[in-house]
Amino acid sequence: MHNLKRIIFFVGLLFSVAGLSANSFQEKIPNDIIISLETGNAKLLSGYFNQNVELVVLDNDNVYSKAQAQQIVNNFFNSFSPVPENAFSIIHDGGKADAKYVIGKLVTEKGNFRVYFLLKKNGDKDYIHQLRIEKQ
């Protein structure tokens, strides 16, 4: 009986720690990135772009400068406006301290898109190195 209590305690502890680490990871994703996707704000999003960004947005698939990437994403948001409420939701995220990825769903007025981005830390700031917005 004593061993059963220990096992239950350790299993509970394991789930608690796993829950805490998942929540703390999500907090490390800059909120402005989420807001920019929810509102279709390419300028805010581009503030997190690395100097060169691997970008896949509809027919655009290449490595672009920060300014070019902002223009492409802006054109996308002009054509596919996010719905007003809860337009972007995170489906999965992971990574490590200096590189994180997010997979999410973007709901627009003209359909749903799968969004993937890769963040890498440079100094104390996260930068988007890859961004994919693909039709679901």
Image (cartoon, rainbow, N blue to C red):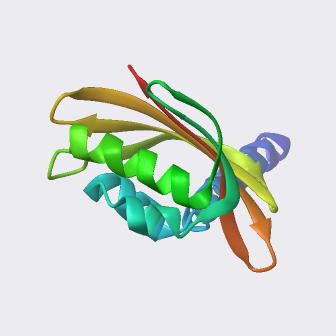
86 horizontally vs 7: left or right:
left
Question: Toward which corner of the image does residue 55 lie, by quadrant?
Answer: top right
Classify the position of the C terminus by image quarter.
Answer: top left
Q: Position of residue 62 (x, y in %)?
A: 64, 34
Q: Position of residue 108 (x, y in %)?
A: 22, 37
Count of numbered marks: 0
Q: Nearer the viewer, residue 19 or 38?
A: 38
Q: Is residue 44 above or below residue 1?
A: below
Q: Is residue 51 above or below residue 61?
A: below
Q: Position of residue 58 (x, y in %)?
A: 43, 26
Farthest residue toward the bottom? 124
Question: Toward which corner of the image does residue 72 lie, by quadrant?
Answer: top left
User: From where the camera sits, is residue 21 visible?
Assistant: no
Residue drawn where x is 24% and y is 50% of the image: 86
Q: Nearer the viewer, residue 130 or 65?
A: 65
Q: Position of residue 96 (x, y in %)?
A: 80, 54
Residue drawn where x is 23% and y is 38% of the image: 79
Residue drawn where x is 69% and y is 45% of the image: 94
11 horizontally vs 62: left or right:
right
Q: Is residue 19 above or below residue 30?
A: above
Classify the position of the N terminus by image quarter.
Answer: top right
Question: Toward which corner of the image does residue 111 lie, by quadrant?
Answer: top left
Q: Nearer the viewer, residue 91 or 113?
A: 113
Farthest residue toward the top? 136
User: From where the camera sits, is residue 129 visible?
Assistant: yes
